[in-house]
Image (cartoon, rainbow, N blue to C red):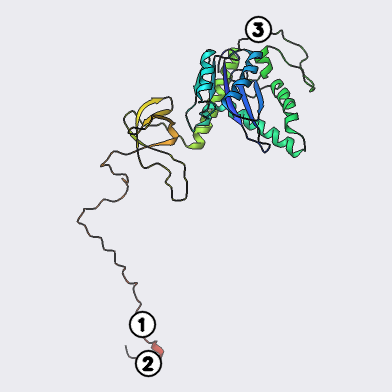
Amino acid sequence: MPSRPWTVLHADLCGPFPSGESLLVLVDSCSRWPEVFILKSTTAAVIINRMKSCFAVHGLPEAIVTDNGPQFVAEEFDLYLREHGITHRRVTPYWPQANSEAERFNRTLEKAIRAANIEGKDWKSELNTFLLNYRATAHCTTGKSPAVLLFGREIRTKLPSLNTSRSPASTSPVVDPAILERDRCQKAKMKKYADEKRRAAPSNIKRGDKVLLKQERKNKLSTKYDPDPYIVVGTKGTSFLLKRRAEPEIMRNSSAVRKLPPEGTDNHPHEAKRKPDQVVDTTTKPRPQRQRKPPEYLGHEK
């Protein structure tokens, strides 16, 4: 978590919705302040225009975190960020947890939109009401509202407030160290829960190992992993940089790869070993038959 607000933003797209529209979501990593824009098109040019209007209000961030969607990997988008001195951090492909701030807010946003539809309301009209209340409500991790952490003051809503005092606005509020520690502890708890749920274990994969990469199963006969192995050529946190022959290098999270045992090793150590010339009798033996004899009351001699 950054020590100052509006320095690192998480960007993502939400949708498309039945109306054909999508939402551009920007979440401040420090304050959790969200900005949401309705889009009829999700091209890089449209996203840049929405960001320009947002940055005209809040200023330019130092970095933006995105996934690897075509809009965010476009040269036009990358050029805009470079020209404005904004670092672009792209998360590991197929690992949305790395952009968790935006992903988590998207889930909350989608619930609010579904609730508006169920109540027969226009979700686009209700969007601003949702954002106002969200920005004024204390976040479960920081214990402060996004408005307080971003502006240094509460914002007024229709909801009654328990604290009517207003703290003076600060042009550059610095987050309380206690909030930073609370954020760190909360993320550690979430990581522990996620690791236990996935039964995650420390990876023993290292540079130079051969690994199999998890692939999308196109049909029921498709294997879970691509049988053509990759070579680990680098590591970054919990992700690996993979290379296969003349193909471009790719980055994948450790949960998507499996170490390939060295050739000549026994993949099933618990199975009983037998000599190559040992013949196993596979014939089925007949079931034992009971001896049948006439009953004694018939007077047969023994």
Hey, what amino acid is under mark 2? Gly
Q: Is residue 64 left or right of residue 244?
A: right
Task: Residue 169: name its quadrant.
Answer: top right
Which residue does the numbered mark 3 point to in the structure image? 171
Q: Which residue is mark 1?
A: 292
Nearest the eye: 84 or 34: 84
Mark nearer the N terminus (2 vs 1): 1
**Residue 230 falls left or right of residue 166:** left
Q: Please tell me which residue lies in front, 68 or 116.
A: 68
* Pointer 2 residue: 299
SS at mark 2 in the image: loop
Q: Answer above or below: position of 278 versus 91.
A: below
| Foreground: disc 3 or disc 2 | 3
Task: Please rate how many residues cluster around mark 1, counting C-alpha atoms within 10 Å: few if below 14, some from 14 to 19, many from 20.
Answer: few
In the image as oriented, which residue stretches furthest toward the bottom?
Answer: 299
Give the number of the disc on residue 56.
none
Q: Position of residue 56 (x, y in %)?
A: 65, 13
Q: Earlier in the sequence, mark 3 or mark 1?
A: 3
CA separation, marks 3 and 2?
117 Å
| Position of the N terminus by quadrant | top right
Badge nearest the viewer, 3 or 1: 3
* Residues tagged 3 and 1 counted as in contact (Cβ below 8 A): no
Tag 3: residue type? Answer: Thr
Q: Give the mark nearest the N terminus, 3 or 2.
A: 3
Q: Position of residue 48 (x, y in %)?
A: 59, 21
Location of the C terminus by quadrant is bottom left
Report crowding for label 3: few under 14, some 14 to 19, many 20 or more residues within 10 A (C-alpha).
Answer: few
Place of residue 234 in the rendered image (x, y in percent of width and height, measured from the top left): 36, 26
Identify whether 261 is placed above or below 4.
Answer: below
Residue type indicated by callout 1: Arg
